[in-house]
Image (cartoon, coloured by chain):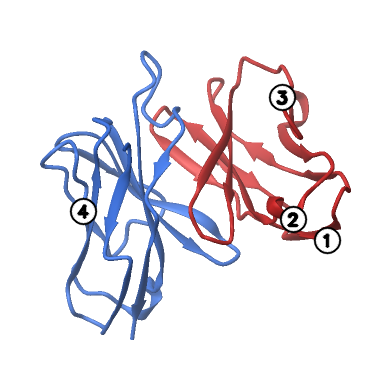
Amino acid sequence: AQKVTQAQTEISVVEKEDVTLDCVYETRDTTYYLFWYKQPPSGELVFLIRRNSFDEQNEISGRYSWNFQKSTSSFNFTITASQVVDSAVYFCALSFWGNKLVFGAGTILRVKS
Amino acid sequence: EAQVTQNPRYLITVTGKKLTVTCSQNMNHEYMSWYRQDPGLGLRQIYYSMNVEVTDKGDVPEGYKVSRKEKRNFPLILESPSPNQTSLYFCASSTRDRGRGYSNQPQHFGDGTRLSIL
């Protein structure tokens, strides 16, 4: 079965703390894509990153970094020095069979000042 | 401006009264999809379309219909809405990933439609 698990329902941190959001996926496909999306309190969905199954390089973009490990089927997202504006729901998603997309349940991140 | 436009943004209606949520994109995208978002369940795919006249079921298609007569439009139809279809709905579109697949590109999402069915 194709599945994405975000085990952390909600995380609360204080500003400037580092925080890691976990994502574990299941798929039988050898070719697949993984995504992270952000949903701020205003409700829109914002694309953050895409990774394909052949590219295990970690990525850093400013305060954001992503750790993709096929051995553990994980695609974790770390925010360094969190800020209040990072407060949002974060979704991990898996694209498989080239035409279907499945999302995790999301992690609510609350960053307090 | 590149965008996905959904209408209406909010709707309160009653059980059994047919409704349509429209979705239009101006980016000439091949792939379009509908999702519903419910607390604790994330986004679940209802239907998707890989091009004009090509549609297929996602994970939760029961009670919904779609059509893709034009590339830019992908309406979601609830023929006989029921209270368990009360949800936040998102339409999305993306280009095709050449040689690989349709859902492998980042999705561009509309602003969402909040449906309440009494």
Question: Where residue A13 sits in the image (x, y, percent)?
Answer: 85, 57
Circles 2 and 1, Cβ within 8 Å, touching? The answer is yes
In 3D space, how far apart are the residues under numbered discs 2 and 1 (Cα atoms)? 6 Å
Of helix, strand and loop, which one carries label 1? Answer: loop
In 3D space, how far apart are the residues under numbered discs 3 and 2 (Cα atoms)? 32 Å
- Horizontally, is A55 left or right of B108 in the view? right
Labels 1 and 3 within one chain: yes
Question: Where residue B14 sits in the image (x, y, percent)?
Answer: 26, 84
Q: Is residue B9 above or below residue A16?
A: below
Of helix, strand and loop, which one carries label 2? Answer: helix
Check the residue under mark 2 and report the chain it is in.
A
* Nearer the camera: disc 1 or disc 3: 1
Determine which of the numbered discs, if any, sits on residue A77 in the image: none
- In this view, the residue in front, A108 or B53, is A108
Of helix, strand and loop, which one carries label 3? Answer: helix
**Callout 2, which amino acid?**
Val
Q: Which residue is mark 2?
A: A84
Q: Which residue is mark 3?
A: A70
Q: Callout 2 environment at 10 Å: few (<14), some (14 to 19), or many (20+)?
A: some
- Horizontally, is B97 left or right of B8 in the view? right
**Callout 1, which amino acid?**
Ser
Determine which of the numbered discs, if any, sits on residue A113 in the image: 1
Check the residue under mark 3 and report the chain it is in.
A
* Nearer the camera: disc 3 or disc 4: 4
- The chain coloured blue is B
